[in-house]
Amino acid sequence: MKPAEAYILKQPEPFKSILMHLQILIEHTFPDAELKYKWRIPCYYFESRPICYLNQSKDYVDVGFWHSAHLTKYTEHMVSENRKVVKSLRYKSLEDINDELFILILKEVEKHKNKSFLK
């Protein structure tokens, strides 16, 4: 088993279910996305460029986007918490995930995948 998959499967509920659901959405949206294990967390790459990372932290799952500096849509749903580059979506339960919105954000991130993380 790959380290990124092991990370997801070893998380307690509800975080394991949240991570698995997000994994399905990402891989459905980007069938060619590659799941890697970087910085001790699962990270998705598309054509060798990072798309997002998944991290179970405190009482939520954090989905971080490095290219968020370029995003103009859906930013009201994201948290930056004093981070200069990354913005993220946070989920405490499966019911918190809006599949349609999550996929729209992924597609917006894809538009900027070849840009620098900073503006």
Image: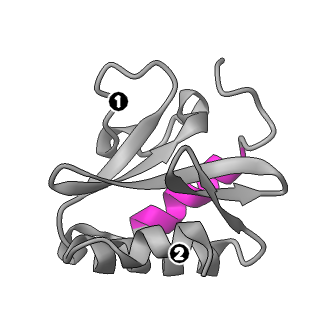
- Cα separation, mark 2 vs mark 1, equals 26 Å
Look at mark 2 in the image and give the residue it sits on.
Answer: 5
Q: Which residues are magenta?
A: 101-111
Give the quadrant of residue 32.
bottom right
**110 left or right of 108 in image:** right
Tell me which secondary structure the magenta stretch mostly adopts. helix
Q: In terms of depth relative to the viewer, which is nearer, 10 or 46?
A: 10
Residue 48 belongs to the span the image colors magenta: no
Answer above or below: position of 69 versus 109: above
Answer above or below: position of 105 versus 100: above
Amino acid tagged 2: Glu
Crowd class of label 2 (few under 14; some 14 to 19; many from 20; radius 10 Å): some
Residue 106 belongs to the span the image colors magenta: yes
Q: Position of residue 15 (x, y in %)?
A: 26, 70
Amino acid tagged 1: Ser
Which of the numbered marks, if any, corresponds to residue 80?
1
For the C terminus, the image quarter is: top right
Residue positioned 24% across, 76% down in the render: 94
- For marks 2 and 1, the one nearer the N-term is 2
**SS class, disc 2:** helix
Give the quadrant of residue 18.
bottom left
For the N terminus, the image quarter is: bottom right
Q: Position of residue 117 (x, y in %)?
A: 66, 27
